[in-house]
Image: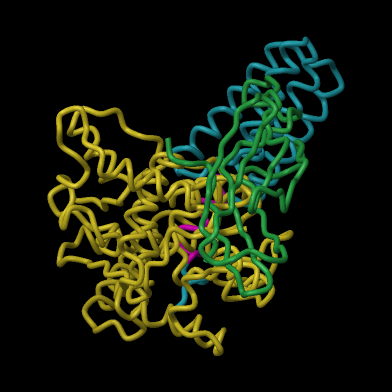
Amino acid sequence: MRNTVLKSVLTALLVAGATSAFAASEDDFKAAYAAAEAANKEAGSLRNQWTTTASTLAAAKKAADSGDFDNAVAQAKEAEALAKASIFQATSEKERWKNMEIR
Amino acid sequence: MKPRSAIPVASAALALALLAFATPPVAAADTVDPAADAKAFKKFFTDKFPKLKPEDFVNGPYSMNEDLHKQWEEKEQFPPYEFSLEAGKEMFSKPFKNGKSYQDCFPNKGIGIRQNYPYFDEKEGKVVTLELALNRCREANGEAPFSYVKDDMAALTAYMAFTSRGKPFDIKIPKDPRALEAYQKGKEYFYTRRGQLNFSCATCHIQSPGERIRAEVLAPALGILNAMPIYRSEWSGMGTTSRRFTTCNSQIRGVPLDPQADEYRDLEYYLSYVSNGLPISGPGARP
Amino acid sequence: MASTIRVRATSNGDTTEVQALIQHPMDSGFVKDAQGQIIPPHFIQELTFEYDGKAVFVADWGGGISKDPYVKFAFKGGKKGDDLKVSWVDNKGATDTATAKIQ
């Protein structure tokens, strides 16, 4: 089980490495941006969005508007990573907050 | 692991859980006992700052730092919230277009009641803060609601706090499971880390009161709402509890919720409850 | 409208201590609003305290003074029950005056 996960991660990394050799297209940006937006929406449903996700999304959009899709895709991926981190934070804090509590 | 073997494990866990419920909770980990919480909360701060009297905590950073305390004493002779307070007094007594006024919306005509807010409204099933009650009063009388964070709202609450100065916080949790749930949710919000900086309210106001964060001295969580609303020199203006909550969130790089969102209402309920018995000192002035 | 000046003067026999708080935006002219427009300069230029027809304290102010400024000073003389007059003029020509009894 764990092996398969590892393999698929490696494959994903290899694929990512392979595509980054070419210039990113508008479609790449759209896909990356949609993924980031979806993750940020999920963070929103957990009431835990980060301001940096929003500003990175805005930066991605700005780069795409100026035609710099390499940068736009990179920013969108960064935004997605931030959103995922905020989701992780919200999920792990569901129980962890109790460690801080004064009793 | 084969999927089939997971079922007996799950049912064993369920049985254990049932067993845990059947026996009286020894560690009290999952029961909600606000009275015990409040006691432990106060004890934490009075142990941490043995020189301070409980009522000193309502003065926030000024109780933590001697230099600041001296500056504050000077400042209180001509407090920066004075203009707002006066405006609030005028607004409070001025009738609405329909002839009614704020006095008609509140018990005791709104005088000396700040210590009872927020309260749990059993009809609504939610926590009602003073700011919310003020805007509902406006809307019920055909007036447009105020912004929750500053200016007019802060002026009104400043006046209402001023008439309640010295009265101890008296937040009640009625025998209603929803009230207890609101309290518990407020507590969870207080201790939950959020934002990119991974801070909870407790990170600053439990772990580090009296320490500096940049140039500011952090206030203790105990009694932190007693001084609301506040004139903050940093804001060069007045701010309500809502303003404090939303800016705290954005400072740790979290997207703030709407002022008076359920989470903030519960948080205010929790924080006020654990400060029960400490006197209202608002409006306050903070650096 | 309520007065923009709060003043308190107390005499200890030899000297009179004066404290005043003035409500004024004190815009420096260098700050932009949320729309990115410069907030035009609007600040008190001269603040005068007069006792017995004589200026005892004159301040030439500019945009560097904070919003709602606070002033404290002491002067020799001043009798209990006498008047102390405070006035300010800002760069837009607006003005306000208040009189306080020395306590």
Residue A89 versus residue B91 in the image, above or below: below
Q: Position of residue C74 (x, y in %)?
A: 70, 64
Q: Position of residue A41 (x, y in %)?
A: 50, 32
Q: Position of residue B26 (x, y in %)?
A: 32, 86
Q: Residue at x 49, y 52 (%)?
A: B81
Chain C: its colour in the image is green
Residue B72, image quadrant: bottom right
Q: Residue at x 65, y 25 (%)?
A: C93
Chain A: its colour in the image is cyan
Chain B: its colour in the image is yellow
The foreground one among C85 and B72 is: C85
The foreground one among B190 and B283 is: B283
Kindly give the residue lying farthest to the right in the view shown.
A21
Q: Position of residue B164 (x, y in %)?
A: 31, 64
Q: Is residue B183 left or right of residue A12?
A: left
- Whether residue B202 appears in magenta in the rendering, the answer is no
Magenta-tinted stretch: A87-97
Residue B280, image quadrant: bottom left
Kindly give the residue lying farthest to the left in the view shown.
B123
Residue C68, image quadrant: top right
Q: Is residue A19 left or right of residue A62?
A: right
The foreground one among B19 and C82 is: C82
